[in-house]
Amino acid sequence: MKILFVHQNFPGQFLHLAPELQKRGHQVRALTDATNQRQTGIETLRYKHTAQPIEPTAARLGRNYAMMSDRGVTVARAALNLRQQGYVPDVIIGHSGWGETLFLKEVWPEAKLIIYAEFYYRGRGADVGFDPEFSSRSFDQVMIAQGRAAYLGQALTHADAGLSPTHWQASTYPAALRQMIRVIFDGVNTATLRPEPAAQFTLPDGRLLRAGDEVLTFVNRNLEPYRGYHTFLRALPDVMAARPQAQVVIVGGDGVSYGAAPPGETGWKQRFLAEVQDKLDMARVHFVGKLPYPQFISLMQVSRAHAYLTYPFVLSWSMVEAMACGAHVIGSATAPVEEVIQHGKNGTLVDFFDIPGWSRALTEALAHPDRFAPQRLAARQTVLENYDLHGVCLPRMVEFVEGFAPKP
């Protein structure tokens, strides 16, 4: 088949699927934003998108759709140019989150279109209003969230099928569209992500942490409320007071991946740290920024307790990767974390807002690693059975895509 991947930051979620399909003999291409210069081994075409200014008088709820549909038009024009050159894909696989797939069926109506249906914005029951400290429960916010979903509904309506990584993320879509979505997790490579008794991680000051050491970890792309950075830091003083030998390693940038930036010039990282810094032994708190992937793996292999929190939103790969490494994950009792972690069986769940509860759970995990050894083993087994890249997820995705092959 001729298969075209569309993603403004390719490969994104298609990191493993695209090369696997190419290896199986399909003609694979990718279409991505010109600012994305990653080299992937896949023939890559690029479109140049210039964001158009939105008129100040434009209805507020329409601004998001205007931005996403503008990109969709840019991608459609690039697709039309490819069509005029004689290129017609059999299958298109694209992420719907930036509007890129909106008009591709107008260019290639004969192609099958699969969209990565990661999340459908909702006014209630998900991230909006979940954390009153940073997200209003006002009716205006409900309407804004509903307005943001317009292009996502359009994207799936004009597709042939959707692909979602968790059942809860698929459930955020309206019932009429949900039946179009196949749930297959992206997959983690358990051959690489595995327990390693000899693992070591070097701190910025040169000290070595080893598997078995008293290490507490927290990982996110950016340190922000959506991923519970504020709850984690607020729980930390009691943990460090109770465990004077514990080393805390915090991974993540100081930008914003989700939600709004904080008011003023101070980022979320420093804003929340300032609340508790005078109660912490900062010689034992290590902010390491964004790590190269091999170093991240080593850190998960030395972690005794790994904290993962999220609003009801998309699930981070890092949580499942930590479980694959045999880490004891203490996770927030929120969707879709609860889809993966069963409390007391393959991890520990704590109410997102229960700061004393987080302090107790993290302290207990650090103090009694032997007690939680069965949960660590069960965590890895959960990943092997349900989320393993080569044994479970990738074969399912390949079968799904190849099911759209043209009939002879």
Image: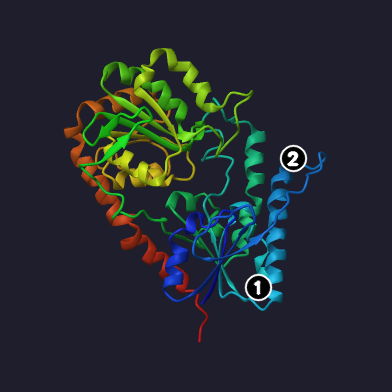
Residue at x 69% of width, y 55% of height:
71
Q: Nearer the viewer, residue 68 or 352?
A: 68
Secondary-structure class at tag 1 = loop
> Which amino acid is tagged 1?
Trp
**Is residue 348 among what the camera can see?**
no
How crowded is the residue under tag 1: few (<14 C-alpha within 10 Å), some, or many (20+)? Answer: many
Instruction: Please identify the residue farthest to the top as the structure is shown.
Output: 278
Residue holding disc 1: 108
Which numbered marker is on residue 60?
A: 2
Q: Quadrant of residue 54?
A: top right
| Image coords of residue 118 (percent x, y) | 52, 52
> Which amino acid is tagged 2?
Arg
| Image coords of residue 193 (percent x, y) | 31, 49
Find the distance from the CA under tag 1 to the CA under tag 2. Answer: 32 Å
Point out the frontmost of discs 1 and 2: 1
Residue at x 44% of width, y 16% of height:
277
Q: Can you say whether 192 is above or below 233 in the image?
A: below
Q: Nearer the viewer, residue 280 or 97?
A: 280
| Image coords of residue 65 (percent x, y) | 70, 49
Residue contact at pointers 1 and 2, CB within 8 angstroms: no
Q: Earlier in the sequence, mark 1 or mark 2?
A: 2
Q: Quadrant of residue 34?
A: bottom right
Secondary-structure class at tag 2 = helix
Which numbered marker is on residue 204?
A: none
